[in-house]
Amino acid sequence: MNRADRLRVAVQKSGRLAQPSQDLLAECGLRFRQSRDKLFCFGETLPIDLLLVRDDDIPRMLAEGSCDLGIVGRNVLAEQDDGTAPVVELRALGFGACRLAIALPQDLPWNGAASLAGLRIATSYPRLLGRYLQSAGVAATVVVLNGSVEIAPRLGSADAVCDLVSSGATLAANQLREVAVVAPSEAVLAGSAAAPLDARTELREMLLRRIE
Ligand code: PRP
Ligand code: ZN
């Protein structure tokens, strides 16, 4: 079967956006032949297939064309945007609201962004944090971690964190307090800036209309 005949939509395999993403596609009338552990789900009602992946992989998969649309946090999309913009936000989806925020241990004072000067800040979002520090004119050390960012201050590997906050439970569990929002976020539908000029174009338009 020609790749051009079927549209591929990537969604988060597990995590905050996984279930609401699949619910949205179900509401759009899409049904998939699906077993939970499988990463590729064949579309039964329309020639639209589902890929279950790590959310962080979605922008790259869209850029390289291995999938056509993706549901991903705006924060993940923004972090991987290097300015060449091969992948764009097509539509905000109204769920998965959260924010990328700076949080400090209770004993560190906060008097605005200048309080971060000279600190080591752990994050999975070095680009967004870097922009925030630059626009605040603050020099701090960015410590890049791919997971378990919240534990870094307790381990002594960082002084503060810059991480995604939804309910705030993770910060509270790690005795951290949120002091500043770096970027608000929510789930968005993302796609390549240059839509493929084949049968997928119409499928992409149809899915966008159904999401409306
Ligand atoms: C984020 C973040 C925290 C958690 C915060 O992870 O890294 O672990 O959510 O949520 P809370 O404020 O409700 O406790 P996410 O679900 O985005 O997963 P990922 O970063 O591992 O992809
Ligand atoms: Zn992730």
Image (cartoon, grey):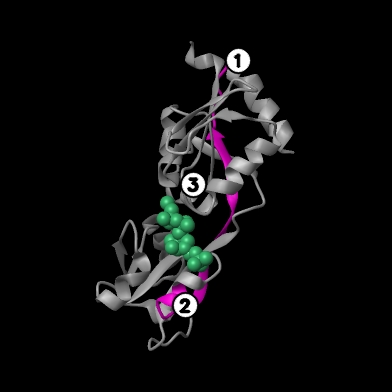
Q: Nearer the viewer, mark 1 or mark 3?
A: 1
Name the residue type under label 1: Ala
The front one of 146 and 173 is 173
Q: Start and end of the magenta stretch? A: 171-198
| Image mark for residue 50 | none
Q: In which quarter of the image is the C terminus?
A: top right
Q: Nearer the viewer, mark 3 or mark 2?
A: 2
Crowding near the residue tagged with mark 3, few <14, some 14–19, many ≥20 C-alpha atoms within 10 Å? many
Does label 1 point to a residue whose CB lies under 8 Å from ligand 2? no
Residue, disc 1: 199
Q: In the shown orientation, is residue 87 left or right of residue 139?
A: right
Whether label 3 touches label 2, CB < 8 Å = no
Give how far across and how far down residue 100 sits, in percent. 49, 63
Residue, disc 2: 172
Residue, disc 3: 77
| Placement of 154 over or under 69, stated as above or below | below
Task: Answer with the quarter of the image where residue 130 lies.
Answer: bottom left
Name the residue type under label 3: Leu
The front one of 3 and 195 is 3
Secondary structure under the numbered disc 1 in the rendered image = helix
Residue drawn at x 45%, y 70% as measured from the top left: 170
